[in-house]
Amino acid sequence: MKKRPIETILYSTAGVAAMAVLLIAFNFITGAFKERIDLTKERAYTLSAGTKAILGKLDTPVNVRFYCTQSESATPQTVFLKSYAKQVEDLLAEYKQVAGSKLTIEKFDPQPDSDAEDSARMDGIESQPLLPNGEPYYLGLAVSLLDQKQAIPFLAPNRERLLEYDISRAISRVITPEKPVVGIMSPLPIFGMPSNPMMMQMGQQGQEPWVLVNELKEDFNVKRVEMDTAKIDDDIKVLVAVHPREISEKAQYAIDQFVMRGGKLIAFLDPVPLIDSQKQQQFSIPNSGSTMDKLLKAWGISFDTSKVVADLNYKMEIGGRNGQPQEAPAFLSVSGGGINSNDVVTSEIDNIWLPFAGAFTGTPAAGLKETVLLKSTKDSQLVDGFMANLGGESVLKDFKPSGTEYALAIRLTGKFKTAFPNGQPEDKKDDKDADKKAADKPADKKADDSLKECKTDTSVILVGDADMIYDHFALRQIQTPFGNLAQPMNGNLNFAQNAIEQLSGDNNLISVRSRATQNHPFTVVKQMQAEAEERYQSGIKQLESNLAETERQLSELQQKKEKGQRFILSPEQQAAVANYREKEKTAKIELKQERKKLRHDIDSLETRIKWLNIAAVPFLVSVSGVGLAFLKRKRTGAK
């Protein structure tokens, strides 16, 4: 009797049942392994190394209570939030996967008048009136360790990029609950000025501390650091230097050693300090700029205090002479692409004012990584600070875009090397006395015990403007029945607070990246649109140039007219006007054609992409099926 071929056995009932058993067994065995593979381009489902390091330090179980309302409502808002809540759950599962038994996650559905709702309120979770029946909607979490607790009142989807950072920060804060110490060094009256007897006799009051200082005191222990200090206190975690004008080498050495010990530095430097010139006239010569020349040179960074950045795209209008508004290309309102949307410090900021900011150039020293937080556009130029302070007209007159995006604020991260390899510098103002004492003392010299290099990675943030954190450039005062109310005009103070908060936290938080959003736009389409719009803008500029030239010609003809010819246009003027109208008509037609070409190119590309997505997979499956059928028929024929 002829044996049945193997194909007959496989396709029999017993063969199908055997394959099903093998498949179930395979899933059961592989399910026991916890390894996962993240195939997304942005590694969206992989925790950062910083988060893993924070979780690795847990020695006592941390509890995470996740609150999410399970509603039957299907409004666009609730459907979107449910989808986002699933992303949060997936991320928390990754935390649990790494932390193991050191992290417990509880999920609550805070329905009205339930114990879960009472728990949510006690944890500081805020409800949102999103449900059609007016019932509250909860989406937040609380992290607790013993008697320490941190809450994220509402997990807003617009902070999706910062989701991992927010959760890791909450865990880090319950692990180390004490307030970090922040030191502030500045020659400016940033801590305010008390009233002296003379001021009191004249009916004048002292100066209040800057709003930034008062805000920082809510979350940090803030200490004053004198400009002539020889050592930064060991308990200071972050040092904020604001316009360190004429800083001595001794103070720079103190900062250098502070960084070598692992301290974090935020320096607000300034080429044209407006705050430092308040007692002067508006258009007078300002006081000298500020830098940290010795430190910056060792880090591979340059900061020219004689130059400021002027940018045609970020220029603002400010009060000029006689109170008339004037364009100020060096008074920057940075937005859009000028703000790093992928960094924790700047990702939630829309606009920053930088009056007369300097630029950071150069290549970071070996072992340091540079991240640009704020930058100009390519339509920018470095201009003389003195000329920029005289008014915008002098800058615009000879403005020539450099094609360079200048760095206005940067962060350096890595192992810094000392700027003082020979140890502590001598105090130059006492050189003569030092020489005299040296002649009387033995030749032995004290051993150099200064640090030469960081043992661990640390961070330094450099900002090219100090005026930005002054109340006048960050807040507006609003008169209310309850007194003056300070309202932010921009994201200046948020930028400063974010930077200080990030550097004052766990070192591992600095390496927690912003998570990629789940939105994948047509980047090629946007690039095509940007290129076409650039061509469109060049057409507008050409049209404006033609208009200006025609107006100049009309003005010249007007000056040449005879007496008594006030309202009647001469033949030359009529010809010029006709020529202008013809040019305008031609330019409008050309611009209209450009728009049509732009729309056609974008529509064609979108159509090709859509058809590729719709037809590609079915086409590949069909081709594969035909190919397999052909091979099978060929084998059957061979038998």
Image (cartoon, helix red, strand yellow):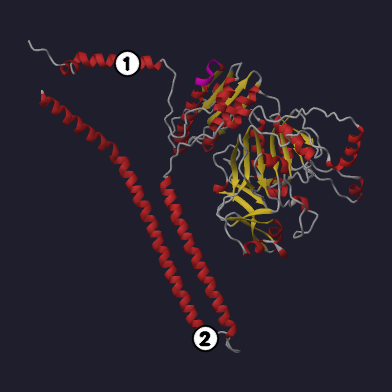
Q: Which residues, given as a range, are shown in magenta?
A: 97-101
Answer whether residue 540 is magenta in the image.
no
Residue at image point 60% right, 61% down: 399
Looking at this rendering, what residue extends furthest in the front direction?
443
Disc 2 residue type (three-letter)? Ser
Return the residue nearer the eye: 570 or 63: 570
Q: Residues within 10 Å of mark 1 (few under 14, many from 20)?
A: few
Q: Is residue 3 above or below residue 420?
A: above
The N terminus, quarter of image: top left
Q: What amino acid is found at the position of numbered circle 1 in the picture?
A: Ile
Q: Which residue is mark 1?
A: 24
Based on the displayed image, in which of its 4 quarters is residue 252 positioned? top right
Q: Residue furthest top?
A: 1
Expressed as whole percent of the image width and height from the top left, the position of residue 104 reads 54, 18
Residue 570: image tag? 2
Q: Using the image as rendered, state which of residue 314 and residue 430 is in the foreground.
A: 430
